[in-house]
Image (cartoon, rainbow, N blue to C red):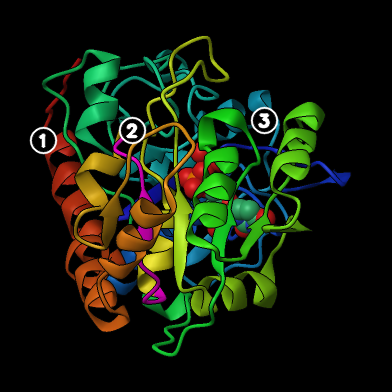
Amino acid sequence: MRVVLVTMALRLPTDPSQWITVPPQGYAGIHWIVANQMDGLLELGHEVFLLGAPGTTPASPAVTVVDAGDIEDMHAWLNGPEASTVDVVHDFSCGQIDPDRLPAGMAYLSTHHLTGRPTYPRNCVYASYAQRAQAGDDSAPVVRISVNQARYRFRADKDDYLLYLGRISEWKGAYEAAAFASAAGRRLVMAGPSWEEEYLRRIERDFGDTVDLVGEVGGDRRLDLLSRASAITVLSQSTMGPWGVVWCEPGSTVVSEAAACGTPVVGTSNGCLAEIVPSVGVVVPEGSPFAPDQARAALADLPDPSSVRGAALQQWDHVVVAKQFETIYHEVLAGRTWS
Ligand code: UDP
């Protein structure tokens, strides 16, 4: 099949003359999700047109990187001659593409990567049952975020630190991760961008002795941190999130990424986490503080690196997930619609 993958087109915050690429230069979950999905489709022999990430280096001759990132340019390309030869458009842009502006009859589906109801719920696939329930869309398919082991680094021999990898925000539970590490008596390496100054200051004030703030990471540093950590902390909180709805963790890219590295997960049960953490880690309550015994017992219960990686491969392997999407592409081509 000739498949268009549309990523969420975003300019690089540190250099707005560039677009965030696939895979991304730093923080950007959707761009990693698209990278892993593209790998899976390529391994199944499909051809990919990547829209929304100009400047990306094509992963293979079967990939065409379309030079369109502005929303109007993306719509124009989708209505142009090259797009008339494609079989299906798989849209990860979370509302940048309006399906009503596509040529009549173009096979289209989207995947939702935010919390709350999608802007265009037509033919939307969700990353978790919790996310789908919050969107109120019971008939839609659920397909997990995939992970290509080849893009990650397995390591059985772990260092002593715990890792937080993500945006340093209240709903992502960075403060609770620091509280957990402090109670367990372990160092927490906290990597990620921080756009909420006061929140960051509160973490430094309360847990300055526990937390190593290393800023946003990419490339080898990111893989090194992910693979050496004794566990990753994903203590997502059901507090008010960025889109005016209570945060319900949608798919959690870092869970599958850590698991591919054999790094177990300490997570809350917010949103998708109740569905995906138990096979690769332990679930702890939302909020803080944690009692030292509670935190140490949670760490003692973590599965070993080999079984964590095995669970990741079984559920989220990029080819396994790409096949699930391939089935849905065929259904959409045959006329299936939902929502
Ligand atoms: N990430 C990164 N560098 C950082 C922090 C995060 O590359 O400094 C990546 C991380 O590996 C993951 C993504 O950003 O792929 C965050 O996605 P996730 O779904 O975990 O969180 P959200 O999209 O809700 O922020």
SS at circle 3: helix
In this orientation, which residue lies closer to the viewer: 111 or 257? 257
Marks 1 and 3: CB-CB under 8 Å?
Answer: no
Residue that carries the numbered disc 2 in the rendered image: 270
Residue at 78%, 40% in the rendered image: 205
Q: Amino acid at mark 1?
A: Ala
Predominant SS along the magenta part: loop
The quadrant holding residue 146 is: bottom left
Q: In the picture provided, is 336 more to the left or to the right than 260?
A: left
| Circle 3 residues within 10 Å: few <14, some 14–19, many ≥20 | some
Range of residues picked out in magenta: 261-269
Q: What residue do we see at 39% from left, 45% from top?
A: 85
Q: Which residue is mark 3?
A: 73
Residue highlighted by disc 1: 334
CA separation, marks 2 and 1?
A: 36 Å
Which numbered disc, 2 or 1, marks the residue closer to the eye? 2
Is label 1 in a helix, a strand or a loop? loop
Q: Is residue 199 magenta?
A: no
The image quarter in which residue 118 lies: top left
Depth check: 337 or 298 in front?
Answer: 298
Neighbourhood count class around disc 1 (C-alpha, 10 Å): few under 14, some 14–19, many 20 upward: few
